[in-house]
Image: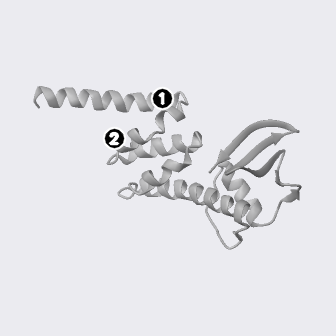
Amino acid sequence: MNKLSLILLFFVTLSYAGIVEDFMNKKYAKICNFNNIRTYLKDEKMLSIIGVSCVRSDKLFLLPFIVNKLKKTSYGRKNAIYFITIFMEKKLLYSYLFDDFDISSFSFPKTDYILSIVFDAVKNKKYVRKDNFIIVNDKNISYYIYKKNDKMIIDKFEKDKLIKRYWYR
């Protein structure tokens, strides 16, 4: 190997280690960006880490760029299914909320992500409508889904206390 190759290998390894370290430290928003996707287009392990980071930081709009590249390995294809499931649930819930689109005929694998919980309840009509809210109850958690301007908002409550607010376009 020549000097340039060794230097490039060093920086690639350092970059790879940086993303893994950020992932272990739950710095998901830092990892999920288009530059990282472009840098690791041929590395399904790194794209999978970036994809999980996008899900955990709610940057779902980047998932289609990742899904199309996860096709050469079994774990890559499985992660692609997970990512596209979440992305499609978001798009369908958004259409349901804004356009009254019927989602009852759609079926996806169940995930533990908030959109899966809400999607499944809305699809199976296991919710209550109150004013402009769709309310889904799941164990001790309540989800209030509503639209605000061009956003779909999901407020997650536990015992009447707001835990987290999610928003999607």
Helix, strand or loop status at disc 1:
helix
The residue drawn where x is 67% and y is 58% is: 94
Which of pointers 1 and 2 indicates the residue nearer the eye?
2
The residue drawn where x is 68% and y is 59% is: 93
| Vertical comparison of 160 with 77: above or below | above
The percent coordinates of residue 23 (x first, y second) are: 50, 32
Please name whichever residue, 129 or 19, is drawn nearer the observer in this view of the structure: 129
Say what amino acid the circle numbered 1 marks. Asp
- Contact between labelled residues 2 and 1, with CB atoms less than 8 Å apart: no
Q: Which residue is mark 2?
A: 39
| Vertical comparison of 145 with 32: above or below | below
Q: Residues within 10 Å of mark 2 (few under 14, many from 20)?
A: few
Say what amino acid the circle numbered 2 marks. Thr
Which one is earlier in the sequence, the residue at label 1 or at label 2? 1
Helix, strand or loop status at disc 2:
helix
Question: Marks 1/2: CA distance?
Answer: 16 Å
What colour scheme governs how the chains and residues are painted in the rendered image of this protein?
one colour
**Residue sitting farthest toward the bottom:** 105
The residue drawn where x is 76% and y is 62% is: 122
The count of marks equals 2
Check residue 2 in the rendering and tell me which mark sits there, or answer none: none
The percent coordinates of residue 103 (x first, y second) are: 69, 69
The percent coordinates of residue 17 (x first, y second) are: 38, 29
| Vertical comparison of 129 with 18: above or below | below
Q: Residues within 10 Å of mark 1 (few under 14, many from 20)?
A: some
Q: Which residue is mark 1?
A: 22
